[in-house]
Amino acid sequence: MCTIHRVEEVVRRFWNGVWGRLARRDVWLVRQTRWRVIARAGDTETGKVLRWEYDTEPEAMAMVDRLLRADTAGQWREQAAGTPPQPTGDDTSSPPTGPTREGGANQ
């Protein structure tokens, strides 16, 4: 019997520095077998989570740069790597062509 462990590493994490349910923004750069970018708008309880997957780090960092250039309240700052939001039971990973909302609904 072979056991396969999925290793997930948070490489970089950013926060816009604003507290509050509506204005807070978080972005994680996560490496698994592929590179994953995770973005959350809002707080941990009610925020919307989007995920993108890429084959290379430069492609993933291009999306991180795009997210950080978006017009949001506050000023982005990098944080120590931490655990990104975990998917719910009905969450599906998105293809590299576009984002998905947590819960599996395409945006």
Image (cartoon, rainbow, N blue to C red):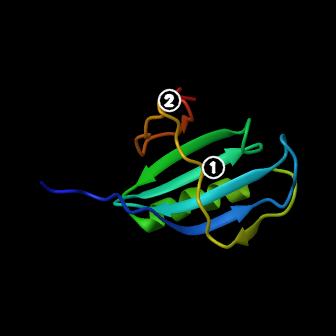
Residue found farthest to the left = 1
* Residue 31 x %, y %: 44, 63
Q: Hey, what amino acid is under mark 1? A: Ala
Give the label on residue 12, or none: none
Left or right position of 33 against 101: left
Q: Nearer the viewer, residue 57 or 46?
A: 46
* Count of marks overlaid on the render: 2
Question: SS at mark 2?
Answer: loop
User: Where does label 1 land, which residue?
Assistant: 39
* Residue 48 x %, y %: 67, 37
Q: Work out how far the residue at label 1 is from the one at label 2, CA to CA, in angstroms.
A: 15 Å
User: Where does label 2 land, which residue?
Assistant: 104
Residue found farthest to the top = 105
Q: Hey, what amino acid is under mark 2? A: Gly
- For the C terminus, the quadrant is top right
Above or below 61: residue 50: above
Quadrant hosting residue 44: top right
Counting other residues with Cα less than 10 Å from the Cα at mark 2, is it few (<14), some (14-19), or many (20 or more)? some
Above or below 14: residue 1: above
Residue sitting at 39 percent across and 64 percent down? 56
Left or right position of 73 against 46: right
* Residue 12 x %, y %: 59, 69
Residue sitting at 53 percent across and 45 percent down? 51
